[in-house]
Image (cartoon, rainbow, N blue to C red):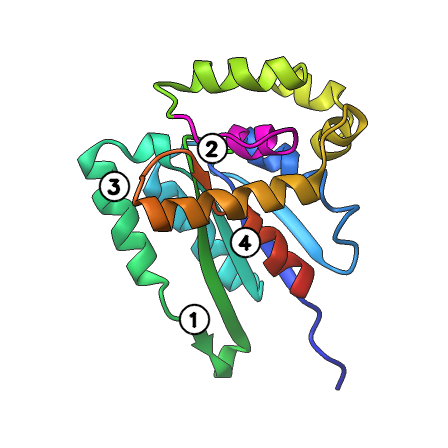
Amino acid sequence: MGKQRQTALILGEGPTEFFYFKSLCDVFKRLTIKPDYPKHTSIKELELKIEEGITMGYNHIFCIIDMDTKDVESERAQYQKLRAKYAKPISKPKKGIYCEVEFFETQRCTELFFLYYFRYTSRSYEDQESLLKDLNQCVEYRKTIDFFIKSKGLHSYFERNGGSLSAATANANHSMEEKQTSGRDYTYSELGRLMKTLESL
C-alpha cells in the first residue's frame, strides 16, 4: 500500500487566516491543505471544527491562534484546556484515524506575520489598529473579505509588493528566539515553525 497522503487541515479563527492559507496552496503543492474557520470565534467552535477534522481523517490539524483575543482570563483558561486535550496525537487504529493537532500562536494577530514579510519588529502593540498601521507603511492592506478577494491571493500579493515568505519565516523564528531569551510575552509569531512543518510533510 502506498504512503498515506499527508493531509493538513488549517484552522484559523476567522477569514484572514482562511484567505491567507488558501493562497499558500500553490507553495505547498504536495500537500492537501484545507483552510477553514469557525463561524463564531469561540474556543467551543474551534473545538467542534477540530473534532470534525479528526472524523474526516486529516493527519494534521494546525490551529492558528490570535493571542490578542486570549487576554481575558476565561478565554485563556479555555484555550489552555483545549491545548492540553490535544497534547497527544489522536489514535484510533480500528477507525483508521491518526491525527496530530498542533497550535501556533501569534501575538497580537496573524497580521504580524504579514508585517514580517517586509521587516522585523519587536515593538509592543497596544491594539490591532497600530499593528495594521505599521503593515500599511509597507503594503496596502485592509482587513476585509473584499480586499482579500481583490488581492488575488494574499501570499503572492505580499511577494508582488516586495515581501518574502522566507523573510517572514526567518523573522517569526527570530521573534520566538527573542521571546525565549528575553521572556517577553508580546509581538511574536509561531507561524515560522508552521511553515517549516508544512515543508517537511
Residue 99 percent location from the top left of the image:
50, 68
Q: Which element carries disc 3, helix, strand or loop?
A: helix
Marker disc for residue 39: 2
SS assignment at label 1: strand
Q: How far is disc 3 from disc 2 in space, using C-alphas? A: 20 Å
Q: In terms of sequence position, does the residue under pointer 3 or pointer 4 come before the other? A: 3
User: Viewed as shown, does residue 153 lie left or right of 111?
Assistant: right
Mark with earlier residue (3, 2): 2
Front residue of 23 and 44: 23
Q: CA distance from mark 3 to mark 4?
A: 22 Å
Q: Foreground mark, 2 or 4? A: 4
Q: Amino acid at mark 2?
A: Lys
Callout in the foreground (3, 1): 3
Q: Is residue 141 visible?
A: no
Q: Secondary structure at mark 4?
A: helix
Q: Which amino acid is tagged 3?
A: Arg
Q: Is residue 119 magenta?
A: yes
Mark 3–mark 4 CB contact (< 8 Å)? no
Residue 65 can be seen in this image: yes
Q: Which residues are magenta?
A: 111-123
For residue 90, the mark is 1
